[in-house]
Amino acid sequence: MEKSTSRILILLSIISAIGLITLYSASYIMTYRYPYPPPDYYLIHQIVAMVVGVAFMIFFSLFDYRKHESYTGIYYILTIVALIAVFFSSRVAGSHRWISIGSYSIQSSEFAKIFLLVYLTAYVNRKNGEIGTFKEGIVDPIIRLFPIYLLVFFEPDLGTTILLFLITLVVLYIAGAKLLHVLGVIGLGVLGILGAYATGLLHAYQAERLTSFFTYLITGSSNYQANMALSAINSGGLFGSGPGGSIYKFFLPVQFSDFIFAVFGEEFGLIGIILIMILYYMLIREIVHISLRVNDIFAKVYITGYAFLIGIQVLFNAGVSLGILPVTGVTLPFFSYGGSSIIALLAGLGIVINIAYSNRD
């Protein structure tokens, strides 16, 4: 267990270091755009978030993971309050997603991901042996978590809503829910999104993203964002233009977050992309390795769910830049700019570490 934990921290440090280099390269150009922040503005904010995140990781690594189950009611209330609070904050880019605190901001939905894992893990631990039924394995947990899906959807944040829903279904499947039930719910979810798209219930920019994606699937013609991202990656070739050498970052939107994978691809090339994907694979493998060596249901399900969260976010973010997924706004874990994401993921990792040391061989 100790070896797996050490490897996780080493891999995390390497990914984060590469992320900081890429983040600075992708974000310093914002100094030329109003309101003209300093060139190291985003880098400093990211480093501060990492320091706070490490503090949370240490705290939760020392906090007995078994006690989380008795606090799920409090966690639920705090999550709902935090998600409601964003609607009383100022809109940013047409969305209510952040609670502003000075020059920093908190994105409640990022912390909701970790809460969701803890809540579902505690739920399946209590319902052990009953998850195979449609009511206990699908209906009850989705109804309980529906207010969270709804609040995130109305921020609006369709990408995170889909991600939260996928996490729910994967955790329930890991815990014993029947595959047919899970696939049925996924099918209903897809129909619901298509129905909202067809009836105009989605926001204009969400509908535009889906329209562009469907157009790309049918005709092969992509929109501006996808074109720029793919052009950046193609421009990188095999070895890339080198750190700071990206040209397309001047044209990509949110290049330090949503499209940071494209900037990285241009600067480090195909070799860099392969290496970063290997690093993520190794990180996820080490996390899963811990889950295979514990017998506690809570521990096993939580760790597997956390590994899935990392993996699906990597696929979402990379898939957007590669043009195989519509723009979702999902961060690249421990890499993209986003303090709330960094802090939440590190806090969640702290629980993994506590599980590992609590179940030492």
Image (cartoon, grey):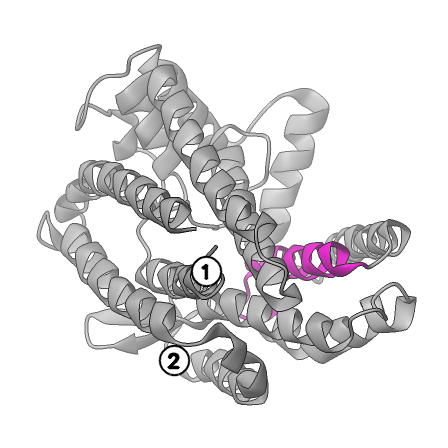
The secondary structure that dominates the magenta segment is helix
Q: Which residue is mark 2?
A: 89
- Between disc 2 and disc 1, the foreground one is 1
Side of 64 relative to 170 (left or right): left
x, y (%) of residue 7? 35, 42
Query: What is the quadrant of residue 61 in the picture?
Result: bottom left
Three-letter residue code for mark 2: Ser
Residue appearing at x 71%, y 63% in the figure: 201
Viewer-closest of 238 and 204:
238
Q: Is residue 161 visible?
A: no
Query: From which residue to which does the magenta span run?
Result: 153-176
Marked residue nearer the N-terminal end (2 or 1)? 2
Viewer-closest of 325 and 303:
303
x, y (%) of residue 170? 70, 54
x, y (%) of residue 64? 44, 76
x, y (%) of residue 75? 52, 83
Q: Which residue is mark 1?
A: 352
Q: Is residue 312 visible?
A: yes
